[in-house]
Image (tube, helix red, strand yellow):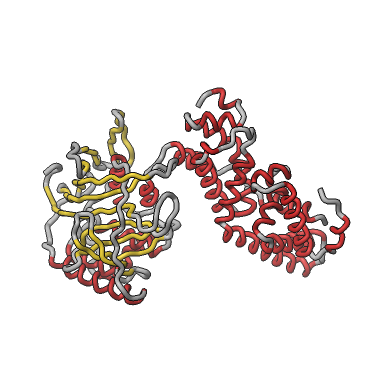
């Protein structure tokens, strides 16, 4: 039989069974016509309740480019992994020194932080930086109205407030552009009591969360993200916070990448995991005490309008408190 | 999006989309199915969807550079898609390997009963998949664009930015290798008139 005829038949046999995937048009045209910050795409794969808060941040931020300031620490992979374990053990020890604060459901976790975010126009591949000071009040039990308040760090701009409506009796009331609507919801507690206090149990907890909400990212990457989400802009009981750092040390592929200056200008050291998106997700700890400072996401390769070493997101936590009222 | 865009040729729509981004939706609606079918054949479901999405995003980004003298955007779009497929060569190779294995399995089962026409067609399909897998990428691009995209020789030349003579010579070589893979006498080709 003629090979071109065979190819015809093969082609017909390989054709898609149905019409075009329905969401493809939206996927293409939304990205093309309505540019989205690059980092929002990065974060889209992250699990956990923190995404909702980050999504709120995205609405206000435009963008951010920093020169990466990683100074590599000598030694190969195994050495870097051993060093990571040391730093994380130090971080756990620091966490255990924190006071255990009693937390009530009607209170708020109040976090002050500074961040720089890289935004990118998908159409033009132009990137821009946004540096902000940020305060959040997150409802402990998820049923009270919280708040995100932020302003540009330079130029003395005004604070911009974003409501984080609580989920009460399974309903959340949201107002967007003057339109108020209600949606079914389940509360997202800012503080969860009874998290594991043992590193192995915490590790199992992280991976269990990953397996309950699987996505295309590698499991270890998702577990690392889940750990970062757990400690970022959050209050954890000291023993649980220590357990998170102990668990991170057990995630395969976690290693020290080098010395960094955190978003608040503090001298830190970064423990990181390479992500399949071509980025590196970092947890930053104080260089001396190994206390947790914040997180960064760094591009590893040139391309998509990015250069290797470019920082996509950098956030530093300044204070974490439990307060009775929003705005307090 | 303006009503005129709906009726205009690709070039006019692309020109309009430079000031009215929404107009680009018309280009998607016209060509997405054809591009997707082609990508799907070569890459399978998931990679095809990604490749098509990336193709349209790249096309949208570069719409300012589109040669408005070209009424039909397909060669341009298939050109971008070809590069996106090249980036996903692992998916393509895996697809041919899977086809080859599936054909082997069925052929072996068939032998237990009786060798019949269906079985030999299956076996041929496996050999064809092996043949496709063994082709040089540039030969495979030409062959599959000719066989599966519905583009003419001239349009394939535009798509790959090569001249028509090169399209013919690559196609010739690709077909010869496929016949070898199918175990047919390559000499028959000797007398075939070049198109």
Q: The N terminus of chain A is located in which quarter?
A: bottom right
Q: Is residue B111 left or right of residue A53?
A: right
Q: Is residue B148 left or right of residue A18?
A: right
Q: Residue at x 64, y 33 (%)?
A: B71
Number of marks = 0
Q: Quadrant of the C terminus of chain A?
A: top left
Judging depth in this view, the residue of A306 and B115 nearest the camera is: A306
Q: Residue furthest right?
A: B191
**Image vertical order of residue A252 relative to residue A217, above or below:** below
Measured as percent of width and height from the top left, residue A111 is found at 18, 51
Which of A269 and B48 lies nearest the eye of the viewer? A269
- Residue B143 in the image: state x and y as whole percent: 71, 53
Question: In the image, what residue occupies the spot 11% across and 46% down?
Answer: A324
Q: Is residue A120 above or below residue B109?
A: above
Q: Residue at x 86, y 62 (%)?
A: B187
The picture places residue A225, in percent across and down from the top left corner, at 33, 59
Image-quadrant location for residue A47: bottom left
Viewer can see residue A55: no
Rendered location of residue A315, percent (x, y):
25, 53
Kindly tell me whether residue A159 is visible in this rendering.
Answer: yes
Task: Choose top left, top right, bottom left or bottom right for residue A192.
Answer: bottom left
Say which of A103 and B159 sits in front. B159
């Amino acid at each position: 039989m003629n090979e071109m005829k065979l190819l015809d038949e093969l082609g017909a046999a390989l054709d898609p069974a149905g019409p075009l995937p329905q969401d493809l048009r939206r996927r293409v045209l939304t990205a093309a016509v309505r540019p989205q910050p690059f980092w929002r795409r990065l974060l889209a794969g992250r699990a956990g309740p923190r995404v909702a808060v980050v999504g709120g941040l995205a609405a206000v931020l435009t963008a951010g480019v920093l020169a990466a300031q990683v100074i590599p620490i000598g030694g190969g992979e195994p050495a870097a992994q051993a060093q990571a374990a040391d730093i994380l053990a130090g971080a756990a020890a620091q966490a255990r020194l924190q006071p255990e604060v009693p937390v009530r459901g009607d209170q708020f976790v109040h976090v002050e932080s500074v961040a720089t975010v890289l935004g990118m126009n998908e159409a033009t591949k132009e990137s821009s930086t946004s540096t902000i000071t940020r305060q959040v009040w997150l409802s402990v039990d998820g049923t009270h109205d919280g708040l995100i308040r932020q302003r540009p760090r330079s130029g003395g701009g005004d604070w911009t407030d974003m409501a984080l409506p609580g989920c009460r009796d399974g309903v959340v009331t949201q107002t967007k552009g003057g339109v108020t609507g209600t949606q079914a919801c389940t509360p997202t507690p800012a503080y969860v009591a009874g998290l594991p206090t043992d590193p192995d149990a915490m590790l199992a907890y992280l991976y269990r969360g990953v397996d309950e909400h699987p996505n295309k990212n590698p499991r270890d990457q998702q577990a690392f993200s889940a750990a970062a989400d757990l400690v970022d802009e959050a209050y954890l009981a000291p023993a649980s916070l220590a357990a998170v750092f102990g668990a991170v040390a057990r995630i395969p592929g976690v290693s020290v990448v080098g010395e960094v200056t955190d978003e608040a200008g503090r001298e830190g050291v970064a423990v990181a995991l390479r992500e399949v998106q071509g980025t590196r997700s970092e947890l930053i700890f104080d260089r001396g005490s190994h206390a947790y400072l914040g997180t960064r996401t760094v591009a590893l390769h040139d391309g998509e309008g990015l250069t290797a070493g470019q920082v996509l997101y950098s956030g530093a936590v300044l204070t974490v408190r439990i307060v009775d009222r929003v705005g307090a | 999006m303006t009503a005129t865009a709906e009726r205009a040729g690709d070039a006019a729509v692309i020109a309009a989309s430079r000031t009215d981004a929404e107009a680009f939706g018309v280009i998607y609606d016209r060509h997405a199915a054809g591009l997707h079918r082609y990508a799907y054949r070569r890459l399978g479901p998931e990679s095809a969807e990604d490749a098509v999405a990336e193709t349209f995003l790249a096309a949208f980004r570069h719409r300012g550079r589109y040669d408005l003298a070209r009424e039909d955007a397909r060669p341009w779009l298939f050109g971008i898609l070809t590069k996106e497929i090249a980036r996903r060569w692992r998916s393509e190779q895996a697809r041919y390997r899977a086809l080859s294995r599936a054909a082997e399995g069925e052929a072996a089962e068939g032998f237990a009963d009786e060798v019949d026409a269906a079985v030999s067609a299956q076996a041929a399909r496996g050999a064809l998949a092996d043949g496709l897998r063994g082709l040089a990428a540039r030969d495979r691009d030409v062959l599959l664009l000719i066989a599966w995209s519905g583009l003419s020789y001239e349009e394939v030349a535009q798509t790959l930015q090569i001249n028509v003579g090169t399209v013919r010579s690559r196609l010739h070589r690709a077909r010869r290798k496929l016949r070898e893979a199918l175990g047919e006498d390559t000499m028959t080709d000797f007398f075939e008139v070049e198109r």
